[in-house]
């Protein structure tokens, strides 16, 4: 039996459906009236950082090569007959997939033939096909992809920063792994990882747009089969509070130096709460967002250009407040950011600025409900984080200026930071 629950939000005057499917999979359906297209994402809570794990009851942890989650994502599109992309070509759907630090997602969008496209998605993700020959072929393809990423200034800037900040956590390893690490991937290892992480209890399906619950369930009931529940235990080496090094540089072909400055957060628990993440997003906008005094000063003095940006970067066992951009005087930019952090710590957050930024985040979140891609991806992401989609609104409403002051004091230490520079 499928258990269906409607989740409503009075403010948005909108709702979606949360379904406990008989297979064990959590399914979300967000119908949008008057939309001509549909978007679906099928995700598993399995990303590049999951390199050491065991199933509950097993004695020993398994260590797998770095980059295997991304490798598995590539291989799932293949089959003994037509690959998934060739099948999608017949329905007219646009398909893709991605692997991040903590999840892997397969997706498609379409304006017709929704049921057929959803059937393809659920079918190919549920039926792996790996052989030694196809694995060896893929090692060459992904090896070239890794080399290209190593020469991408923006990509390398981020991972250089992560290597400068993190001693042991696998977040410092490129999502695709290294040419050396993927050379150790075998078909048997892929099947082992698949059986561990591609269990319905570790996955979620979200569909938004011109769809109904009945359409989604008609396909899910046909394709998805129950599997025995498996509890996964992950294991990470202890991560010191300190950063590895203050500054790391690399030379690549760039018109102007690219920098990334990260303030490593000393965390007591592996995962950040939704409230902490929202507080940090507001805090970064107050310190150096597009409407902040610091941003205007850096732009007017020619220290940065419009590529300057901020990000709260967090996941299981890692979190950092990051500032990125281009500058010929990146040391000065770092000095100015440090100065602004210390000023706000001393004087406190401007209540007027806080109110304005909070309203901006509130408005941005509500605007996202016009975008079916964002809705579906957020449904999966929030579920994996242990939250509901509408929960963000109530948590955001509860945040005060005093919370932001406390977050700044506790989460950002200018002595515990690193800078990556691509010359």
Image (cartoon, rainbow, N blue to C red):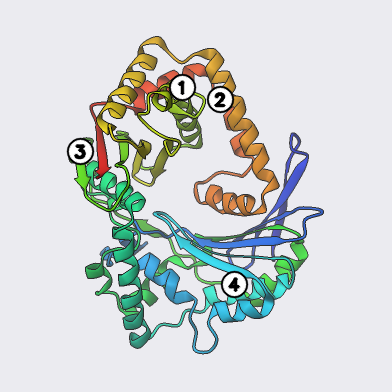
Secondary structure state at the residue bearing disc 3? strand
Whether residue 212 sits left or right of residue 90 in the image: it is right
Q: Residue at x 81, y 53 (%)?
A: 33
How many C-alpha atoms fall within 10 Å of the one at disc 4: few (<14), some, or many (≥20)?
A: many
The residue wearing badge 4 is 121
- The answer to which image quadrant residue 119 occupies is bottom right
What separation in Å lies between label 3 and label 1 (alpha carbons)? 28 Å
Q: Residues within 10 Å of mark 2 (few under 14, many from 20)?
A: many
- Comparing marks 2 and 4, which lies closer to the viewer? 2
How dense is the environment of label 1, judged by Cα within 10 Å: few (below 14), some, or many (20 and up)? many
- Badge 3 is on which residue? 247
Residue at 23%, 27% (x, y): give it. 415
Determine whether the residue tagged by mark 1 lies in a helix, strand or loop.
Answer: helix
Q: Secondary structure at mark 2?
A: helix
**Mark 2, mark 1: which one is toward the viewer?**
2
Q: Quadrant of the N terminus?
A: bottom right
Between discs 2 and 1, the one toward the N terminus: 2
Point out which mark residue 357 bears.
Answer: 2
Identity of the residue furthest to the right in this view: 34
In-front residue for pair 318/306: 306
In the image, which is nearer the foreground, mark 3 or mark 2? 3
| In the foreground, 203 or 345 | 345
Of the numbered discs 3 and 2, the one sitting upstream in the chain is 3
In screen coordinates, is 38 left or right of 44? right
């Amino acid at each position: 039996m499928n258990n269906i629950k409607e989740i409503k939000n009075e403010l948005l005057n909108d709702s979606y459906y949360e379904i406990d499917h008989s297979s064990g999979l959590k399914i979300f359906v967000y119908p949008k009236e008057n939309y001509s297209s549909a978007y679906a994402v099928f995700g598993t809570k399995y990303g590049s950082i999951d390199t050491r794990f065991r199933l509950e009851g097993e004695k020993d942890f398994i260590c797998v090569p770095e980059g295997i989650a991304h490798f598995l994502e590539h291989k799932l599109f293949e089959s003994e007959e037509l690959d998934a992309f060739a099948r999608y070509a017949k329905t007219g759907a646009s398909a893709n997939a991605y692997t991040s630090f903590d999840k892997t997602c397969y997706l498609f969008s379409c304006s017709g033939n929704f049921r057929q496209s959803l059937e393809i998605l659920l079918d190919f993700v549920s039926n792996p096909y790996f052989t030694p020959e196809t694995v060896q072929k893929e090692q060459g393809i992904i090896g070239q992809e890794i080399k290209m990423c190593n020469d991408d200034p923006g990509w390398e800037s981020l991972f250089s920063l992560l290597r400068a900040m993190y001693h042991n956590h696998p977040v410092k390893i490129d999502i695709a792994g290294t040419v050396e690490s993927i050379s150790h991937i075998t078909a048997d290892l892929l099947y082992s990882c698949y059986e561990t992480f591609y269990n319905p209890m570790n996955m979620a399906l979200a569909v938004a747009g011109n769809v109904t619950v009945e359409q989604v369930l008609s396909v899910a009931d046909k394709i998805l089969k129950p599997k025995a529940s498996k509890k996964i235990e992950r294991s990470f080496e202890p991560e010191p509070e300190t950063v590895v090094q203050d500054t790391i540089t690399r030379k690549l072909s760039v018109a102007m130096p690219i920098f990334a400055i990260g303030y490593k957060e000393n965390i007591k628990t592996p995962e950040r709460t939704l409230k902490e993440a929202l507080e940090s997003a507001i805090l970064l906008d107050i310190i150096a967002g597009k409407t902040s005094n610091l941003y205007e000063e850096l732009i007017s003095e020619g220290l940065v250009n419009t590529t300057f940006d901020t990000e709260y970067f967090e996941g299981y066992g890692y979190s950092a407040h990051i500032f990125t951009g281009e500058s010929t005087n990146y040391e000065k930019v770092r000095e100015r950011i440090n100065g602004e952090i210390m000023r706000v710590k001393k004087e406190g957050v401007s209540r007027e600025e806080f109110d304005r930024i909070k309203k901006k985040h509130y408005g941005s979140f509500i605007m996202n409900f016009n975008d079916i891609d964002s809705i579906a991806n957020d449904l999966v992401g929030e579920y994996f984080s242990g939250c509901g989609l509408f929960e963000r609104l109530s948590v955001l409403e509860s945040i005060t200026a005093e919370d932001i002051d406390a977050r700044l004091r506790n989460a950002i230490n200018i002595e515990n930071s690193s800078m990556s520079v691509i010359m």
